[in-house]
């Protein structure tokens, strides 16, 4: 089977890779590019564990073909932290114990980052609505919501 050549930007870096036409972006991230932070939870787009940003939009990478990344800009969980260390969202997830097994955490953090980029001061309802596409089996959602609220407060204070 012939492979497709893809040129894209992932977490600010220009990347080229080969993939088979039916390969998902999730498979390419993990198996071809070694970006293991993005997790597979369901493989059907229902859980949000594989959430990435594609040109600023949230997408389930298990539902996207890798070839569709051609010329696009992707952000994965590996692109959330900065050169000085963890992003405030990542720190707040740790501080609030908003994670346990870790399968859903990357998707929640990417989704929460997208929310705070668009709405730096969301109320609890907005956070719950925005994160509704991400499922957690371990922690429940209160700690996750509190972590996002606390991150929003800290980011507002820094601004």
Image: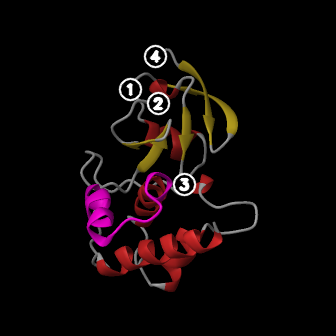
The numbered dot on residue 22 is: 1
Neighbourhood count class around disc 2 (C-alpha, 10 Å): few under 14, some 14–19, many 20 upward? many
The residue carrying mark 4 is 1
Cα–Cα span, label 2 and label 1: 8 Å
Q: Which residues are magenta?
A: 116-134
Cα–Cα span, label 4 and label 2: 15 Å
Cα–Cα span, label 3 and label 2: 15 Å
Q: Secondary structure at mark 3?
A: loop
Q: Quadrant of residue 137?
A: bottom left
Quadrant the C terminus occupies: bottom right
The residue carrying mark 3 is 36
Can residue 119 be found in the magenta stretch? yes
Q: Secondary structure at mark 1?
A: loop
Asked if disc 3 and disc 2 are in contact, CB closer than 8 Å, the reply is no
Q: Mark 3 against mark 4, which lies toward the viewer?
A: 3
Residue closer to the observer: 156 or 144: 156
Q: Secondary structure at mark 2?
A: helix
User: In the image, is 1 to the left or to the right of 79?
Assistant: left
Residue closer to the observer: 124 or 80: 124
Rendering coords of residue 79 (x, y %) = 61, 52
The residue carrying mark 2 is 66
- Decide which of tag 3 and tag 2 comes sooner along the chain: 3
Q: Is residue 73 above or below residue 84?
A: above
């Amino acid at each position: 089977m012939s492979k497709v050549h893809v040129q894209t930007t992932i977490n600010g870096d220009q990347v080229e890779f080969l993939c088979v036409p039916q390969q998902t972006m999730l498979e390419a991230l993990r198996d071809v590019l070694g970006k293991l932070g993005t997790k597979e939870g369901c493989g059907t787009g229902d859980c949000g564990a594989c959430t990435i940003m594609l040109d600023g939009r949230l997408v389930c990478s298990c539902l996207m073909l890798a070839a569709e990344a051609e010329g696009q800009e992707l952000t994965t969980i590996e692109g959330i932290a900065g050169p000085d260390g963890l992003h405030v969202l990542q720190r707040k997830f740790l501080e609030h114990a908003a994670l346990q097994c870790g399968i859903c955490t990357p998707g929640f953090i990417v989704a929460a980052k997208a929310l705070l980029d668009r709405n730096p001061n969301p109320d609890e309802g907005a956070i719950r609505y925005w994160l509704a596409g991400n499922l957690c089996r371990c922690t429940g959602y209160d700690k996750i919501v509190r972590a996002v609220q606390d991150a929003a407060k800290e980011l507002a204070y820094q601004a």
